[in-house]
Image (cartoon, helix red, strand yellow):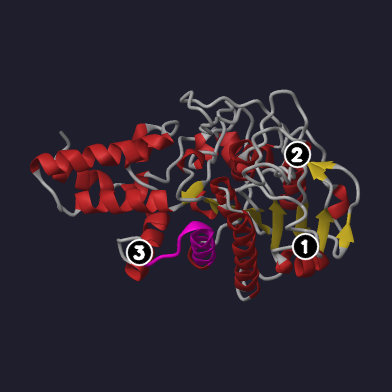
């Protein structure tokens, strides 16, 4: 059994040890440069969406996206998710397509039906960036949904040249709950059998990040993220009844991180449109509207912040499309590999991106990784599709 004193000592050590990567070779350390920008915010317009309700100006539930943002950047309305045998059209796969620039046939590591605990075999854009530049982990972020804990560790690949030492950090309600429990144990809230039970709960919460070495997992997310959660707790409390939920929560986490953590590269994994699986079309269209409102808040936050204003590129892209079958009992599905589930789009805006441009030709979802490499000046060597050159002004 871990004693309270030992746990407290371990937790306090997080301020210094949790953010230390394993040693890099001297020549590799010297080759890493300071980074000045541009910053990049990837918005996964997630949960799977169709073109009709998003970028079609006559039918959109996202008017800020379709009628305002398209004027500020380059739209790829005919983007596709690859038609490969065995390639699923779902959220986890789509997210890793975006992050790695490679289509792959993933298998759930826990062998769960519809499970999405996947391991990327080639580097993510976070790893490319952090291996190229002296950017700390807390300045590369995934902002994740509370009910998609299986995506908590899409922050790094298992590639032998990259991996956990170049991973991003994660903001999510799951991580906040872990922080709360770790802190309560360290503060001596329980003892005896109650303490043992809470320590077991914490071990279970930490274990989702199983690929990160246990020592690093148990030390927490480092001093910067811990301070972020301290501020979040001071404002919203412990209950979860006060803070926003669903995709509104992701927007709030992202906007707050811009002010305090100043991420250079951030991916926000919106997912509310997926509630259409309950069978009500309004869940889907409402989810799209919530993401659109989130985009407005994000752009306003960037434009009001000297650190980001004029030095931030947005890359907005769905994880997958959705079915257009009007006779299906449950509308807008995406698990059946229909043609429309492969039909997505992408929009890039910001410095160095062509404005008011529509590239009316087929492009691939995996092209975004190389494009971000060109924007941020790193080599995405394992990405398999060329950059979206038409977007580069």
Q: Earlier in the sequence, mark 2 or mark 1?
A: 1
Residue 185, above or below 386: below
Percent coordinates x, y for residue 255 in the rendering: 54, 66
What is the spatial separation of the Cα atoms under label 3 and label 2, in whole angstroms? 37 Å
Percent coordinates x, y for residue 62 in the rendering: 70, 64
Question: For the point 33% across and 68% down, which residue is it?
Answer: 234
- Residue behind mark 3: 241
Magenta range: 242-258
Q: Which label belongs to residue 342?
A: 2
Question: For the point 53% across and 45% down, which residue is it?
Answer: 168
- Residue behind mark 1: 59
What is the spatial separation of the Cα atoms under label 2 and label 1, in whole angstroms? 20 Å
Q: Residues within 10 Å of mark 3 (few under 14, many from 20)?
A: few
What is the spatial separation of the Cα atoms under label 1 and label 3, in whole angstroms? 34 Å
Residue 345, above or below 234: above
Q: Nearer the viewer, mark 2 or mark 1?
A: 1
Q: Residues within 10 Å of mark 1 (few under 14, many from 20)?
A: few
Q: Are marks 2 and 1 in contact (CB under 8 Å)?
A: no
Q: Nearer the viewer, mark 1 or mark 3?
A: 1
Q: Nearer the viewer, residue 8 or 58?
A: 58
**Quarter containing the N terminus:** top left
In magenta stretch: residue 254: yes
* Main secondary structure along the magenta-highlighted residues: helix
Q: Secondary structure at mark 1?
A: loop
Q: Nearer the viewer, residue 339 or 44?
A: 339
């Amino acid at each position: 059994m871990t004693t309270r004193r030992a746990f407290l000592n371990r937790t306090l050590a997080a301020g210094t040890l949790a953010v230390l990567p394993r040693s890099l070779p001297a020549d590799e350390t010297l080759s890493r440069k300071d980074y000045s920008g541009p910053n990049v915010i990837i918005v996964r317009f997630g949960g799977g969406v169709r073109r009709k309700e998003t970028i079609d100006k006559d039918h959109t539930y996202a008017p800020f996206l379709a009628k305002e943002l398209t004027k500020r950047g380059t739209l790829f309305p005919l983007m596709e998710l690859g038609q490969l045998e065995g390639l699923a059209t779902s959220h986890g796969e789509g997210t890793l397509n975006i992050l790695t620039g490679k289509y792959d046939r993933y298998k759930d590591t826990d062998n769960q039906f519809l499970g999405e605990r996947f391991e990327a075999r080639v580097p993510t854009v976070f790893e490319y960036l952090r291996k190229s530049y002296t950017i700390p982990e807390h300045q590369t972020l995934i902002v994740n949904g509370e009910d998609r804990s299986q995506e908590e560790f899409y922050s790094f690949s298992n590639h032998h040249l990259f991996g956990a030492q170049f991973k991003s950090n994660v903001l999510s309600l799951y991580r906040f709950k872990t922080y709360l429990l770790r802190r309560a144990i360290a503060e001596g809230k329980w003892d005896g059998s109650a303490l043992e039970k809470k320590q077991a709960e914490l071990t279970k919460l930490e274990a989702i990040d199983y690929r990160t070495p246990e020592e690093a997992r148990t030390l927490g997310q480092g001093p910067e993220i811990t301070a972020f959660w301290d501020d979040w707790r001071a404002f919203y409390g412990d209950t979860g009844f006060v803070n926003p939920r669903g995709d509104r929560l992701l927007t709030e986490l992202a906007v707050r991180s811009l002010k305090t953590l100043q991420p250079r590269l951030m991916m926000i994994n919106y997912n509310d449109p997926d509630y259409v699986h309950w069978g009500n079309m309004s869940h889907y269209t409402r989810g799209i509207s919530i993401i659109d409102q989130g985009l407005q808040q994000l752009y306003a936050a960037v434009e009001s912040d000297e650190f980001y204003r004029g030095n931030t590129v947005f890359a907005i892209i769905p994880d997958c499309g959705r079915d257009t079958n009007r006779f299906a009992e449950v509308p807008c599905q995406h698990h059946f590999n229909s043609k429309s589930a492969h039909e997505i789009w992408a929009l890039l805006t910001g410095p160095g991106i062509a404005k008011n441009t529509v590239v009316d030709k087929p492009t691939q979802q995996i092209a975004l990784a190389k494009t971000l490499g060109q924007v941020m000046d790193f080599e995405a060597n394992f990405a398999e599709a060329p950059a979206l050159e038409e977007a580069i002004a």
